[in-house]
Image (cartoon, rainbow, N blue to C red):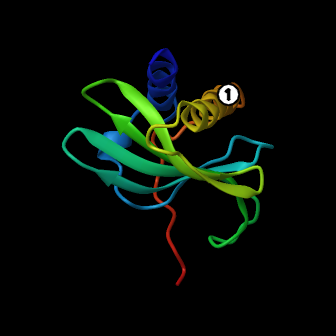
Amino acid sequence: MELYEDNYRMVRLLMPELRSMDGSVYLSQPEGRMQLELSQIEHNRYTTTFNLTYRFTESLRGEREPDLSVRIYHDARSCEVLSGFLHSRWESRKVRSLDSGYRLNRFLFKWLSYCLRQGHSFSNSVPVVRAD
């Protein structure tokens, strides 16, 4: 549970206004760094679910990896990876599997730490306008 709580704290640092963001696409790109994309935000009473990925091309349909689906439990102040594309393969967290849950959540912990050190932030982010 400590790992889930640490992930929650880092997500809150990276996305301080997450609860007020809608289902749009948001980008973070400190100078000279890759674009970090936050999308598919869905709010429920006690949870928020979203996708977090690197965008390797300027296209909204560009390559993405890692590409994680993450859920925050606001009342428990914890955060977990539900599934994702990682190391060029799709990984879905098995409900009762400690191994897959730990592996994906440990990766999220390391990735969030790295993103914060790189200066990424979704504070005051404006949604990306799609040119469809």
**Residue located 46% across and 35% down the image:** 80
- Where is 54 relative to 10, above or below? below
Residue highlighted by disc 1: 110
Give left or right: position of 85 versus 3. Answer: right
Q: Nearer the viewer, residue 129 or 64?
A: 64
- Percent x, y of residue 13: 49, 26
Query: Is residue 62 visible to the viewer in this orientation of the structure?
Result: yes
At which x and y percent is residue 41?
Answer: 39, 54
Identity of the residue drawn at 44% across and 29% down: 12
Task: Classify 112 as above or below 36.
Answer: above
Type of amino acid at the residue the image marks with label 1: Lys
Viewport quadrant of the N terminus: top left
Vertical order, 51 against 6 (above or below): below
Residue 68 shows in this picture: no
Q: Position of residue 68 (x, y in %)?
A: 57, 49
65 on left or right of 69: right
Residue 88 sits in which quadrant?
bottom right
In the structure shown, which secondary structural element does the residue marked by tag 1 occupy? helix
Count how many numbered circles sit on residues in the image: 1
